[in-house]
Amino acid sequence: MQAERPLRIVIAEDGVLLREGMVQLLQRFGHEVSAAVGDGDALLAAVREHRPELVVADVRMPPDFSDEGLRAARALQAEQPELAVLVLSQYVEQTFAEELLENGEGGAGTGYLLKERVGDVGEFMDAVGRVADGITVVDPEVVRQLLARRRGPLERLTPREREVLALMAEGHSNAAIARRLVVTEAAVAKHIAGILHKLELPADDPDVNRRVVAVLTYLRGEGT
């Protein structure tokens, strides 16, 4: 899914080549990049000035290269609850991912991706669209680690159900999962019903994002 409307976007990335590459890519798909900056303070100022719909930010930026981008993103979402945020990281940083995803139940979309995903244009633009549409989007590697860490009821799932669960946790809709697995949406719905039953998760909520949050909460070990 790509956002059907042009988006106003602010980018924060200290690497000049990646920053400029994202600017050109987003503009090529019809989006307006209101500002492209290289540190957390500049990100705060740019968002307050331009009021974008989406922020794409690196986790680690000057001056300390710790969690400046993440802290700035969370501060901005506290000020502007409707602001969608897609955070990029060089490596899977579980603590940062979980901290960011704590905001997943809010109205604005939130995403955590590895920087290598930017190189896959389709995958990156799909994530931009889903985050802008209010969905929680999680990098497949983060989901893989969560699945590996969580045991117990997951062992009841068939291999196909585990595939579907992983794609659910990444924030994909039924239609997107069906395309990925080359099956019908009816088959996906049947698998999801089985998964939710086996994991004792709410099965009557059609909202994609609440379902994603429920699955992520379970995988993080906070559910039943």
Image (cartoon, rainbow, N blue to C red):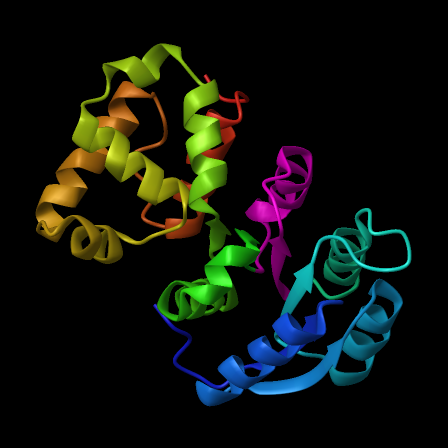
With 113 as the anchor, is 49 left or right in this view? right
Can residue 82 be seen in this snapshot?
A: no
Residue at 68% x, 76% y is 10
Q: Is residue 92 magenta?
A: yes
Above or below, 214 against 34 in this view is above
Residue 81 locus on image (x, y percent): 69, 62
Query: What residue range appears in magenta?
Result: 82-108
Q: Is residue 5 left or right of residue 61?
A: left
Q: How many marks?
A: 0
Lateral position of residue 72 relative to residue 55, left or right = right
Residue 208 lies, in percent from the top left, at 37, 51
| Quadrant including the C terminus | top left
| Residue 75 image-quadrant placement | bottom right
Which of 160/153 is in front?
160
Quadrant that contains the N terminus? bottom left
Q: Is residue 185 magenta?
A: no
As drawn, is 59 to the left or to the right of 89? right
User: Which one is in front, 120 or 157?
Assistant: 120
| Position in image of residue 17 (x %, y %) | 65, 75
As drawn, 105 above or below 123: above
Residue at the spot 39% in from the left edge and 63% down from the top edge = 123
> Which residue is at the far top?
152
Q: Does residue 116 sit above or below 67 in this rendering?
A: below
Q: Quadrant of residue 156?
A: top left
Q: Residue furthest front?
A: 17
Is residue 36 something that shows in the picture? Answer: yes
Residue at the image point whose x is 10% and y is 47% from the top: 186
Q: Residue at x 25, y 28 (%)?
A: 195
Can you give x and y, in whole percent of width and height, for residue 70 in the image? 74, 52
